[in-house]
Every structure is written in structure tokens, then in C-alpha cells.
Amino acid sequence: MDLPIESCILNAKSRSWEPYKYKSKQAQDENLDMLINWISQYTKRDDTFSMSAYQRFYNNYSRKKQIISSNTKCV
């Protein structure tokens, strides 16, 4: 996926409760500011989940691939 940062932030704000990670939706939402900050740094970070890491993975993958750049359903 190669979504605009703004779309990623909207996705984070509208995500459903992840009960395998959090005790409640409220507990999950208490981390929302941290998550939005982390997402906003995507292009600047150089960690495992950074844009540069994903770009390296994509470039090195030799099989069929596609870039998804919007929040549409893929089948």
C-alpha cells in the first residue's frame, strides 16, 4: 500500500476496536495521538515500518506486485 499520510491518519481514527491488543476501545483510543504522530513520521523514519524499509522490500520482491494507493477494496 502506498496511501497518502492523510488517508492513513483517517484510517487510524476510524479503525474498529482491536481486542487482541487492547482491553477496551477506550484504551485503544488513548493511544490514538501517539499513533497519529507515528504515522505522520512515516516518510522520515528509518525503522522496520518506515517508507524506506517498505520501498526496499517492494523493490527487491521479484514476483508479480501492485501498488494500492487508495482505500478501495481489492479482490
Image (cartoon, rainbow, N blue to C red):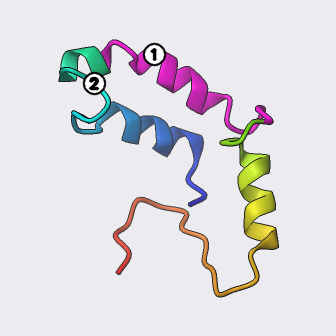
> SS for tag 2?
loop
Residue bearing mark 1:
33
Q: Is residue 43 magenta?
A: yes
Between discs 2 and 1, the one toward the N terminus: 2
Please tell me which residue lies in front, 40 or 55: 55
Residue at coordinates 38% horizontally, 75% vertically from top-left?
74
Q: x, y (%) of residue 59? A: 80, 70
Q: Quadrant of the C terminus?
A: bottom left
The segment highlighted magenta reads 29-46
SS type, badge 1: helix
Q: Which residue is mark 2?
A: 22
**30 is higher (above) or lower (below) than 8:** above
In the image, what residue occupies the spot 27% across and 24% down? 22
Q: Is residue 8 above or below residue 21?
A: below
Instruction: Please state which of residues 23 and 7 is positioned toward the viewer in this rendering.
Output: 23
- Label 2 amino acid? Tyr
